Image (cartoon, rainbow, N blue to C red):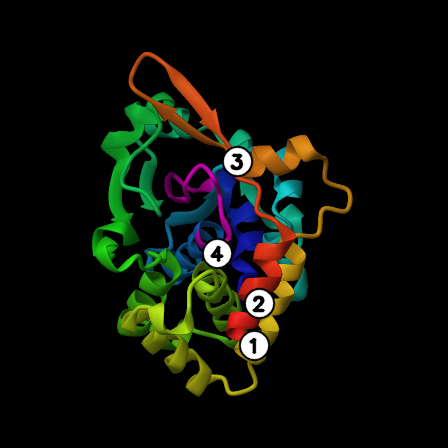
Amino acid sequence: SLGFLRRSENRSKRLEKVHVVLGNKPCDLDSLISTLAYAYFLDKVSPPDVLCLPVLNIPRKDFSYFTETRFILDELKIPESFHIFRDEINLHQLNAEGKLSLTLVNSNMLTSEDKSLESAVVKVINPDEQCDRSLELQACSSSLVVKEILQKAPELITQQLAYLLRGSILFKCMSLEADKMTEHQEKVLSVLEEKFPDLPPRDEIISALQETQFNTQGVSIEEIMLKDLKEISDGEIKVAISTVLSATWCVTNVHKWA
């Protein structure tokens, strides 16, 4: 179902309008899968003269840090060469030429260097706006993407797409107790599982993703820290903070879902 990634490469030179779906800067699994899935949906429902592209908001060289993301894409035989990374497309030039439309995933804000792209933003998929923080529930853009596709074009949900989106939702929620999952997320998972009963059991997917997340083979300590690097700024001073989870956390939370 995601073969449009290859077709998009062949169409890019002859189209005048480009609708880019851009994920957030950390490019976590939820953001990446939502970006791919929503661009696929747009590719199917947009006019033929509009090129719809998912753009991963990291340089290509940083993709090696995201072991859980590479795992789920490898499972579906989606090669890395199909993806477009932020350092491979000039969004500012497209916008200056009046060719760019932009959908933001997992954030309603552009980074400071992208402020000039605000005029191109046509849609924002921001789960934080629909999350009850008082209940400490995890916002998930993948579940919002599933909901929109089911409402507007349910026939586009294939088993491959369901595998991607379901894995993303489970990975986002797996640090919580099962009863802390939002009603919306549980409903989305149930719909996908009813539609595709051959999907692997939830605990099997969670265990595989957890194991892959903590597989640091071939990844340096510096790369592990850069993967989850977050920047905090008060306008004048910028502070970089990174989080490295322990293997104990991994084992404990796998048991919650088993």
Q: Which residues are magenta?
A: 14-30
Q: Which residue is mark 4?
A: 33
* Tag nearer the camera, 4 or 2: 2
* Tag nearer the camera, 3 or 2: 2
Residue 17 on image: x %, y %: 36, 41
* Tag nearer the camera, 1 or 4: 1
Q: Is residue 81 left or right of residue 57?
A: right
Please rate how many residues cluster around mark 4, counting C-alpha atoms within 10 Å: few if below 14, some from 14 to 19, many from 20: many
Residue type at tag 2:
Val
Q: Secondary structure at mark 4?
A: helix
Q: Decide: is 225 above or below 192.
A: above
User: Could you tell which of marks 1 and 3 lies nearer the N-terminus?
Assistant: 3
On the image, which quarter does residue 78 sit in? bottom right
Residue type at tag 3:
Ile
* The residue positioned farthest toward the top in the image shown: 236
Please rate how many residues cluster around mark 2, counting C-alpha atoms within 10 Å: few if below 14, some from 14 to 19, many from 20: some
User: Could you tell which of marks 4 and 2 lies nearer the N-terminus?
Assistant: 4
In 3D space, how far apart are the residues under numbered discs 1 and 4 (Cα atoms)? 24 Å
On the image, which quarter does residue 141 sit in? bottom left
Residue 258 on image: x %, y %: 56, 77
Residue at the image position 27 percent from the left and 41 percent from the top = 108
In 3D space, how far apart are the residues under numbered discs 1 and 3 (Cα atoms)? 33 Å
Q: Decide: is 105 above or below 2.
A: above
Residue 258: image tag:
1
Q: Which residue is mark 2?
A: 254
Please rate how many residues cluster around mark 1, counting C-alpha atoms within 10 Å: few if below 14, some from 14 to 19, many from 20: few
